[in-house]
Amino acid sequence: MESGLTVAVFGAYGHTGRFVVAQLRDRGFVPILSGRDAGKLRALASETGLDARPASVDDPASLDRALAGAAAVINCAGPFATTAAPVIEAALRAGIPYLDVAAELEANTDTFTHFTDRARAAGALIVPAMAFYGGLGDLLVTAAMGDWTAADEAHIAYALNSWHPTPGTRTAGAVSRERRGGGRLVFTNGQLEYRYDTPPTVEWPFPDPMGPRDVIAEFTMADVITVPSHLPIPEVRTYMTVEAAREVTAPDTPTPTPVDPHGRSAQTFLVDVVVRSGDTERRAVATGQDIYAVTAPLVVEAVDRILTGRTKAVGVASAGEVFDAPDFLRALSSHISVELRP
């Protein structure tokens, strides 16, 4: 799509934000650079030749200026517990779609809780967690469901060969841990529950060439918010390979290091999704490189589809509800390999 439409990117100078800006330009959009750090914005504007509009979540007028004339806004600035609501409010005032890349469960829950009715009444579209965590898992589960309208269980297992967290990941994690008061969340019996024990370690049968690996069970990610928001599945669980879980929580793990011209790290991922209804099982498997970099084509494809009217929902909705999941995943074939196994 060679649209020339402008899309505001809040947090444009962050690790993921830079990937999003580059992907928008590749797709023919004109990014508006925005965020809280005027110095970093000026540096990115000098580097890219794009318009920079500093804005603060504490200053609604500055957000209105940042979004003026934009066709949509993508929020890449965490912690989303702080940024999501003010940027959504600005998007509603501007009458434009809002998307974010939040992996914070609590922030995503807040978005559904506080904005669903208002967004639906306004005919607005708000898509939280349109990212590797939350968005991709939801699309995979929805595609794997096929003609099923409900299932008993959905399991989303992540195999990362490494996980070097960005500063934003560490900050968001700290905010979530503080909000949970030392607990952890699981989605069971159709609702979120807090648990205070140590999550179990089990073996997950990843497909070849990965093979069986030890995973942290109940390593809960944003998929437990996005999937149940539109699919009647009472048990939604996410899993993470033990090595990656250790790396992301270790205080001395370095940040991602670019290894190719696109700025991607050497990190690879495999996402194994299993949905069960009675004794029947369906599966979807996705593989790719760099969970932060791959978020950019996910969210930019979503923007493209929203602005060209290829959507199925209004209000606050997750990726699997808004888009044709199998078609969306096929559109990402140059970034993510997907196999559906009925």
Image (cartoon, grey):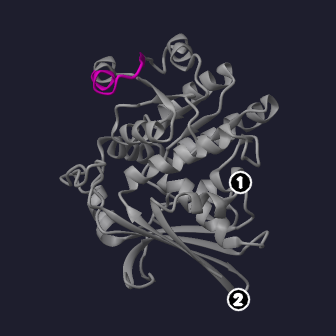
* Image coords of residue 107 (percent x, y): 54, 41
**Alpha carbon distance from label 2 to label 1:** 25 Å
Circle 2: element type: loop
Query: Along the polypeptide, which appears first: circle 2 or circle 1?
Result: 2
* Image coords of residue 16 (percent x, y): 38, 42
Residue under numbered circle 1: 321
Say what amino acid the circle numbered 1 marks. Glu
Density class for disc 2 (Cα within 10 Å; few <14, some 14-19, many ≥20) is few
Image disc number at residue 279? 2
How many discs mark residues in the rendered view?
2
Mark 2–mark 1 CB contact (< 8 Å) = no
- What's drawn in magenta, residue-wise? 43-53
Picture layout, residue 269 above or below residue 99: below
Circle 1: element type: helix
- Which residue is at the front of the view, 16 or 152? 16
Residue at image location 59% in from the left, 40% down from the top: 303
Q: What is the quadrant of residue 61 in the picture?
A: top right
Confirm whether residue 186 shows in the render.
no
- Which residue is at the front of the view, 145 or 59? 145
Residue at image location 19% in from the left, 51% down from the top: 254
- Which residue is at the front of the view, 147 or 29? 29
Quarter of the image with the C terminus is: bottom right
